[in-house]
Image: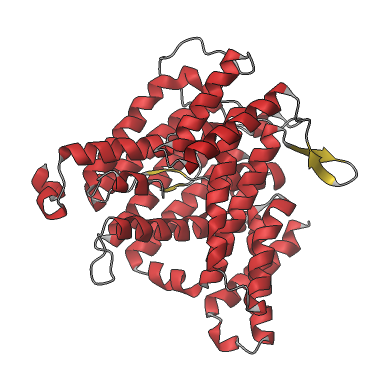
Amino acid sequence: MKKFFDFEANGTNYRRETIGGLTTFLSMAYILAVNPSVLSLQGIEGIPESMRMDMDAVFVATALAAFIGCLIMGLYARYPIALAPGMGLNAFFAFTVVLTMGIPWQTALTGVLFSGVIFALLTISGLREYVINSIPMEMKMAVSAGIGFFITFVGLQGAGIIVTNDATLVGLGVLHDPKVLLAVAGLFITAILMARRVPGAIFFGMIITAILGLLFGLVPRPESFFGSVPSMEPTFGAAFEAFSNPSEIFNIQFLIVVLTFLFVDFFDTAGTLVGVASQANLIKDNKLPRGGRALLSDSIATIAGSIFGTSTTTSYVESTAGVAAGARTGFASVVTGVLFLSAIFLSPLIVTFTSEVTAPALIIVGALMVSNLSKVRWDQFEVAVPAFLTMFMMPLTYSIATGIAIGFVFYPITMIMAGRRKEIHPIMYGLFVVFILYFIFMTE
């Protein structure tokens, strides 16, 4: 085992790798509660039950997708990088594809499946670098920041801190409502833990908030701590149902869904890989050894997750917490994966994690994603406008895809008018046409 993971060359041992894997798990374990909450549209009222995914089934799918992703990353790519259904991508799945576009969640899972297969093909063919390099850095960062704003808005709405207002569209909620106060308390607790740089701060913030909710009778009390593994029957294999009705997948709307899943996962994974590998000093001669394997691990996990019944599985930047604790090899990822697998026996606790409990995690994760704004060149108007519209229109239109579409339509226009036509990659023109078609057909 030591030889397989090359412990000696990486200056590590079982103890450091195990502690690193545990630290990474605690840093990202919040997804076990947040993902079922998001995909089941918890806190959204007045919608048919058919639009909601089964929380218990999604909980198991989340744990299994994370387990498979971590296992493949650890054994095949041998990197200390953990994977799980991604934040932002799950929000796009639930609030844009299902809630706004009205696409059945079963068909949305088909979109995730398609994006995973395409991602795998791009990785194997070597086109990955070509596509990544075609998108301007400012637009990549704007997309990431915009998703951060969107996730924060979803969290504030789910907590009741932000509510509908007939005069101004949105307004401040009733802050003296006990459940809203619980969410506010959770936000303060999580922010304090983050500021104190406590490992697993988001996870522990949710736990403390849930305990407060139980003490004051604001969240449901679980019947037990451990339980049998819930059935995945409501979601397992649902990604294949759309194949019986080709009209659901052969249309411009479905194409946009697949492209957005692919786009966000593409760059989120690439950025995470580089960031974590840099911190662990794994980059050699400005290249990432076994980088193709790492990206292929991501795509295989996405394919598996879609079959189980969850949104796109991606690499987690929280892996840096494990690296900081000593992780240097894939053994740490295997440890993280095993812990996710063990978590499926804790399903009775999922009822405790209501939208008020998970809201602080959404808000804090959103704040972390917005930090990418510092990498946008705001002093260049032709770049600043499409970047600004990309991130600002996501929460305003309640659609990640629409934000991306608007920004990518404006980018070639402003760049051409600024006399910088030669800096526009041909792929950006292709995306311009695709998103114009998106707006044309979306209104029908």
In this image, 400 relative to 423: left or right?
Answer: right
Q: Which residue lies furthest to the top in this view?
A: 223
In this image, 81 relative to 42: left or right?
Answer: left
How many numbered callouts? 0
Quadrant including the C terminus: bottom right
Residue at 18% x, 37% y: name it: 15
Quadrant including the N terminus: top left
In this image, 51 relative to 342: left or right?
Answer: right
Q: Position of residue 210 (x, y in %)?
A: 54, 23
Q: Which of 1 and 24 is in front in this view?
A: 24
Q: In this view, does 70 lie above or below 411?
A: above
Q: Which residue lies furthest to the right in this view?
A: 167
Say how the picture is coloured: secondary structure
Q: In which quarter of the image is residue 72?
A: top left
Residue at 58% x, 57% y: name it: 145
Res 103 seen here: no
Q: Nearer the viewer, residue 360 or 294?
A: 360
Q: Nearer the viewer, residue 113 or 204?
A: 204
Res 59 seen here: yes
Residue at 55% x, 70% y: name it: 138
In this image, 9 relative to 128: left or right?
Answer: left
Q: Position of residue 387 (x, y in %)?
A: 63, 68
Q: In this view, does 176 lie above or below 304?
A: above
Residue at 15% x, 42% y: name it: 13
Q: Quadrant of residue 401?
A: bottom right
Q: Which residue lies furthest to the front in this view?
A: 196
Q: Where is residue 157 in the image (x, y as percent from the top left)?
A: 70, 38
Q: Where is residue 3 in the image (x, y as percent from the top left)?
A: 9, 47
Q: Nearer the viewer, residue 200 or 123?
A: 200
